């Protein structure tokens, strides 16, 4: 093993020496549920990418994450896995309502994220819904309170917050902003502020983007708690 910083958290999990710094490079070595491991294996995900290896151990410890890595580096699994594990550990059930919200800047990205969520969550008992524009909002309104995980665009999420009777996210455990640099952009500013003001502050938050978002204002607005900054760059 490479040398560890003296304050590195190291723990023995089964037979695997596990550490956020020197630990495994395979999903199999992560402290996640069998349901999640089985799904990852069935999807042929074996080796973690750099951003996954850097962020997953921290995210699985309950920390807030600010992650930056280029497009195509595997950021989706870096937030979908800890999100699913958090709800699983909290024994979230169909009756518990909205436990997690993933906000995506576009319908296409929301759609792709929803597919990954379905793969990783296939053995779990959560309900999930895709709430994006261009669909019949009235039908969504009848079901949205029965969903555990929402994958949505900012506009549609706010529409439900404003219009759907009894829409309740007061028990929210995990908030994800995917492509956070684009969501935090001026175009979505008012929408995002309105959304954030209605979410509970005690929660885990993951921000992922292709570029690092370190604006202090943005982070304060999002109530990030001492986030772990992880930036993975291409090797020169
Ligand atoms: P990003 O959000 O960083 O642009 P994605 O999460 O969309 O990247 O992943 C890009 C591609 O890489 C997807 O096709 C995904 O299935 C694949 N991928 C992600 N993680 C892994 C992994 N650990 N092993 C193999 N393929 C992966
Ligand atoms: Mg992505």
Image: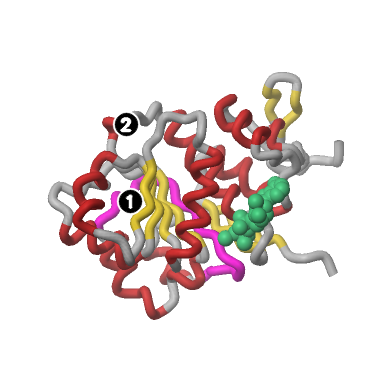
> What residue does disc 2 label?
94
Say whether marks 1 and 2 touch (CB < 8 Å): no
Is residue 141 rendered to the left or right of residue 135?
left
Indicate the secondary structure of the residue bearing disc 2.
helix
Image quarter where ligand 2 lies? bottom right
Quadrant assignment for the C terminus: bottom right
> What residue does disc 1 label?
201
Is 210 magenta? The answer is yes
Q: Main secondary structure of the magenta part?
A: loop
Q: Residue at x 70, y 39 (%)?
A: 44
**Quadrant in the picture for residue 107:** bottom left
- State whether residue 76 appears in this view: yes
Count of numbered marks = 2
Query: Which residues are drawn in magenta?
Result: 198-214
- State whether residue 7 appears in this view: no
Q: Residue at x 51, y 49 (%)?
A: 115
Image depth: mark 1 or mark 2 in front: 2
Q: Is residue 154 above or below residue 164?
A: below
């Amino acid at each position: 093993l490479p040398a560890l910083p003296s304050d590195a958290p190291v723990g023995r999990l089964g037979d695997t020496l596990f550490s956020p710094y020197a630990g495994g490079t395979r999903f199999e070595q992560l402290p996640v549920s069998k349901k999640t491991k089985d799904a990852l294996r069935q999807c042929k995900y074996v080796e973690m990418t750099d951003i996954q290896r850097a962020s997953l151990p921290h995210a699985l410890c309950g920390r807030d994450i600010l992650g930056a890595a280029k497009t195509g580096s595997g950021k989706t699994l870096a937030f979908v896995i800890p999100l699913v594990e958090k709800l699983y550990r909290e024994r979230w059930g169909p009756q518990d309502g909205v436990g997690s919200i993933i906000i995506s800047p576009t319908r296409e990205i929301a759609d792709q994220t929803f597919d990954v969520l379905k793969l990783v969550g296939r053995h779990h008992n959560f309900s999930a819904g895709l709430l994006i524009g261009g669909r019949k909002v009235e039908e969504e309104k009848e079901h949205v309170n029965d969903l555990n995980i929402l994958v949505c665009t900012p506009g549609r999420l706010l529409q439900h917050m404003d219009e759907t009777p009894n829409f309740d996210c007061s028990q929210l455990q995990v908030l994800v902003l995917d492509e956070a640099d684009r969501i935090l952009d001026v175009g979505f500013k008012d929408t995002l502020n309105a959304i954030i003001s209605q979410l509970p502050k005690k929660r885990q938050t993951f921000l992922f983007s292709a570029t690092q978002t370190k604006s202090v204002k943005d982070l304060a607005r999002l109530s990030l708690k001492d986030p772990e900054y992880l930036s993975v760059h291409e090797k020169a």
